[in-house]
Amino acid sequence: MKILLIRPRPHKETIGLQHVMVCEPLELEYIAGNIDCSDVEVEIIDMILEKKTLEDFILKYQPDLVGMSGYITHVNVIKEYASKIKRVKDDCKIAVGGVHAEVMPQDFVDQNIDYIIEANGIKTFNRIIEALKGSFSPSDPMELEGTYRRGKKSLKENSFSYKIPDRSKVARYRDRYYYMFHNPCALIKTSFGCPYSCSFCFCKEITDGKYYTRSIDSVIEELRGIPEEEIYIVDDDFLFNRDRILEFCQKLKENDLKKKFLVYGRADFICKNEDIIKSFRDHGLRSVIVGLESYKEENLNKYNKKTSILENEQAIKILQKYGIEPYATLILDMDFSVADFKNLYTWLKNLDLTFVNLQPLTPLDGTEIYDAYKKDFIISKDEYEKWDLAHLVLQPQKMTIRRYYFEMIKLYYKITMRPKNVVKLIRKYGLREVLKLSVGSSRVTQQYFIKMIRGE
Ligand code: SF4
């Protein structure tokens, strides 16, 4: 059996972080590394990096089964891919998975998609292979555990005991995977879900609110096989358990693993565990993505973030004290006035931040705030490519859409392009890397300018 695993290219409407980062398709590498049958050939195709068309690959590989994964922004892209694949090879079966399929599987219902994987991706993909080989019955997707079956819900696992991802399947792409200045950069996942419950968050829905971890020994074993020095730990919250981080640092040392880590972490943990932050810095922690979310206490409460403005400020200071770069993410509420944008700028400037990610409040389908905002959407649910956490999906209350986009771009450039920040970046990463990233972010800006001009 021939299997093609395809990572789709984003839709041209999607305002894309793909201009400043392209990371490896870890979920497809996991599938490739965990296929139980021996008489199966597997290839991974990354359409973000490929120049040839999808049809070229289908003609070349003649797959029996295609697996695709993506986010909400890929729903229409994946349906279009499925249609193209069937036109070239109508007996090819198509399975779709990924984080959006795990929470909103019904969005992928389409005449050209045979299996929608809503739970336990690796196990379910193997079940699909067995069903197609006829060694497992029933082969009707409506009856296959782990796939989307109307009226039935699959139980999600709460442990992870699979083999490590097969990174050799993307060997030809590896030197082009990067995350901003982390270049080249490898991904690793050590835990699943998040123990917190921020109201806007989609991540916690993927595991049905459960949180579970891999053993540190298995993480170290995987790290030993990764040649890249830059490692992006894609856990929703890596900075959670003191003892686990200490064990991680200890084992990095024992194994003489010298890596540079980028992780997600919460402000409250950083404030309460300065000693851990220092120790982890000594073992390679270089950058932390912190969801500051707001400069207003009332919004933090509204989002059920369970952090405070004071903790946000202290966390940034602690990271800076140890030379760790904070990447701050912020939610821009729809009641923002021009004064709010100014106040946020002053707050971010006083924190001396270089990297900020500004996201207009986006109630994604599947999150607990979705229903409350449903009546206020200014784009339709099935324009999936626009649900990218960058488009406005709600009407701003105190200004026009045009003005709101303008204030967003202005704030972004006022923070990131402060002369002090530019000089710092050139010193740290070199002119070439800074120029390369500037070209990427100017593409994002161009997309925003088009939105501004169209006022949509
Ligand atoms: S926003 Fe972060 S901390 Fe909050 S639930 Fe989501 S992953 Fe957890």
Image (spheres, grey):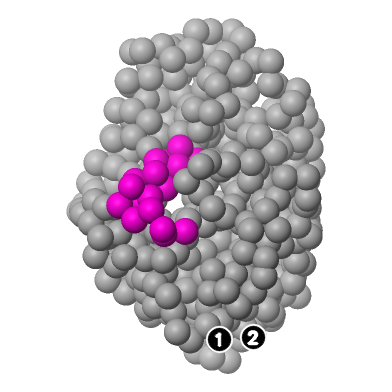
* Front-lying residue, 39 or 182: 39
Q: Is residue 396 left or right of residue 48?
A: right
Vertical arrangement, residue 35 with respect to residue 418, above or below: below
Can residue 77 be seen?
A: yes
Q: Which mark is residue 221?
A: 1
Residue 62 spot, x, y in % from top left: 31, 65
Q: Position of residue 230 (x, y in %)?
A: 42, 69
Identity of the amino acid at label 2?
A: Asp
Task: Quickly name the residue at label 2.
Answer: 217
Corner quadrant of residue 185: bottom left
Q: Which residues are magenta?
A: 74-93
- Type of the residue with mark 1: Glu
Q: Is residue 22 above or below residue 447?
A: below
Quadrant in the rendering for residue 144: bottom right
Label 2: which secondary element: helix
| Residue 22 left/right relative to 255 | left
